[in-house]
Amino acid sequence: MYAAFVIAWKDLVLLSRDRVTLFWVVGFPLVFALFFGAVLGATLDRGGRVLEAPLVVEPDASAALVAAFESAPALALERASLDDARERVRRGDAAGYLRLRGGGVEIGVDPSRETDAAILRGVTLETLGAAGPAAPGGPPGPALRTAPAIAVVEVVGRGASARSVADLVFPAAVLWGLMGCAASFAVAMVVERSGGTYARLASAPFPRATVLAGKALACFAACLLDAGVITGMSALLLGVRFEAPLAVVAATVAASICFVGMTVLLSVLGRTQQAVSGSGWGALILMAMLGGAMVPVSAMPPWLQTASYASPVRWGIVALEGALFRGFTARELALPSAVLVGAGALSFLAGLCVLSRQATR
Amino acid sequence: MSQAGSSTSGIRVSGLRKRFGSVDAVAGLSFHADPGETVGLLGPNGAGKSTTMALLVGLLAPDAGSIEIAGTSDPTRPAARRRLGIAPQDLALYSELTAEENLRFFGRLHGLRGRRLAERVERCLAMAGLQERRDDRVGTFSGGMQRRLNVAAALVHDPSVVLLDEPTVGVDPQSRNHILDALGQLRSEGRTLLYSTHYMEEATRLCDRVVVVDRGRVLAEGTVPDLVARHGGRSRAHFTLATPPPPGTCVGGRPLHEFGGVLETDDPTQALAELARSGLALEAVTVESPNLERVFLNLTGRTLRD
Ligand SMILES: Nc1ncnc2c1ncn2[C@@H]1O[C@H](COP(=O)(O)OP(=O)(O)O)[C@@H](O)[C@H]1O
Ligand SMILES: [Mg+2]
């Protein structure tokens, strides 16, 4: 094991001396956070979208109102109980909910999704406007004799909630950092394998797996360090506050494990530095795109939102958002964390398979 | 500091085979190096020298044949590897680390720590002549300096068997001399050296015994004088003339038509005397004794540098 630590330390020293890689690992995620934050903050108009939301219909709700909302073209509503609806908004599965009760409407919004909240409010006003007051000649509906009351309720996590765009950007920034680590260590691995130094490592007095263990250890340490730096910078520069630091650490560790495994798999995508660096970044960018680290998942069409769960990046964002401002309990954090660790373990094993086949030739 | 002299520091290889696809890189190789002996593997590019080295340290698994090295038949065993040092043909150094950091890293990999590590690193830096440059990154070194460090890195853990795969390839004469001197020093310390090269001068200068290999097979083996006597042929006197030879001139029993020629002989002195007596206007005469290059040429019809 001592040898694995020696190798890991050497790799970290090498990383610290490689300025280009350092930029990809630390600088780029921060640039991304600043840029993406600015864009997110400015974009509030997303017209033409159909918003999905759970609809809570209380027994005393006006039938006309229910009919009006259910036929509103801008909304795709699905009936749900109040608890269910709140839960879905809190978990981030829905942008908001609508609750019809008596002659009034309650809008439950996720304050971290300002755009969606604004659209929901707008659509509600529009729908109410279309439904009443009474058309001339006909008797007005019973619920619409008076102007309907609109109440906006913020559904927030048990602990913290997203207070700023920075909170939303932070998880993606951390994931970009981890992806940078994965790419650079995948390249470091193939460089070590294809370079002359491998002959020395593989003829040193320990099993060959130690070399891989050392690399994985270094990659894991780099992931944690990197996430730490990005977290610190986010706190300093972007004003992100961490009210459940333990949960954030847990999510970061799970995501790091995932990307250590990814690293091993990426490193066998080619046999040269160029091949691995090209195809590695290609694969990572696909994962980032699908997983919502480039365009937020909430801006994707529903089928893409579902497909995004195929990307480990999505699970990383779910875990980090949950920890940062959705107030996930340990139990809720367990699912995304388990998916992350599982995906990491699977890719590690897959990479190992290819490696051992290459070694025996 | 020598650990040699015991049965744990010899090399014995028999019937070794390794095939890559359709290429028989090593095709039934057998040779040995006794403890304390310096043995050269002499052969052209593609002869299978590097593959043999990789098989000897367990980087590759042989298709057939047996290996005994550093007291074991399984070179992947840690106990054997602690007694084995290898200087691979491709530079095996981290160019972003300094000379000292490289040596410390490889020393640690072999389990050295503390004062022993510091001592060994110091010795190896001295051996490579790089004490002044110890804190400079290897990437800033000249090719020759990198080669010297590549050899030194094989020695940090004080191995009793050292495998050197073309350690002087592409090196300036000064660094080459430095490396050969250092290897001479290792030899005098009683270590077992296996030295692969396609430079016959190096094999001649350094090795107790030479194994001539080509296409994965051993062509001949023995001390240099022994090989030269068996396969080197006769000495040659090359001469050029200042004026054309008179018609009908014979040298060494053969008619001479050109401005020069070659005399093959077992006794160069006598050949020179014959030339002097011939009354020809000699411009230059060089005598070439048989050497390993000629041994290889006679055995294969090709030169070592083909
Ligand atoms: N990994 C490999 N894959 C395929 N062929 C190889 C491999 N390594 C060596 N060879 C082939 O085996 C032969 C011997 O190569 P090598 O041992 O490197 O020779 P040398 O070191 O004497 O120049 C060459 O023909 C080379 O092309
Ligand atoms: Mg070679």
Image: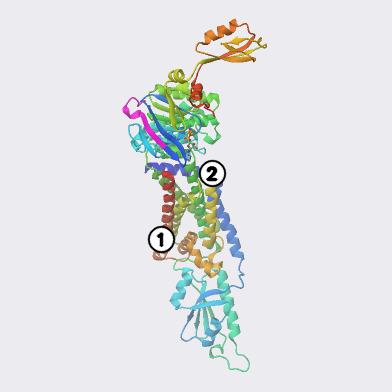
Is B11 one of the magenta-colored residues?
A: yes
State the CA–CA distance, disc 1 to disc 2. 33 Å
Residue A18 marker: 2
If the image is split into quadrants, where does the N terminus of chain B sit? Answer: top left
Q: Is residue B5 above or below residue A76?
A: above
For label 2, being within 8 Å of ligand 1 is answered no
Question: The residue marked by circle 2 belongs to what chain?
Answer: A
How many tags in the picture? 2
Q: Chain of mark 1?
A: A
| Residue type, numbered disc 2 | Asp
The image shows residue A330 at horizontal and vertical percentages of 39, 64
Instruction: Name the residue rendered at 55%, 72% in the picture.
Output: A117
Left or right, residue B212 beside residue B83: right
Q: Disc 1 marks which amino acid?
A: Ala
Q: Quadrant of residue A298?
A: bottom right
Q: Nearer the viewer, residue B278 or A350?
A: B278
Magenta part of the protein: which range? B1-17
Residue A172 located within the stretch drawn in magenta: no
Describe the element under mark 1 as helix, strand or loop: helix
Instruction: Determine which of the numbered discs, if any, sits on residue A338 in the image.
Output: 1
Q: Which sits in the foreground, A349 or A334?
A: A349
**Which sits in the foreground, B235 or B37?**
B235
Q: Residue at x 57, y 80 (%)?
A: A72
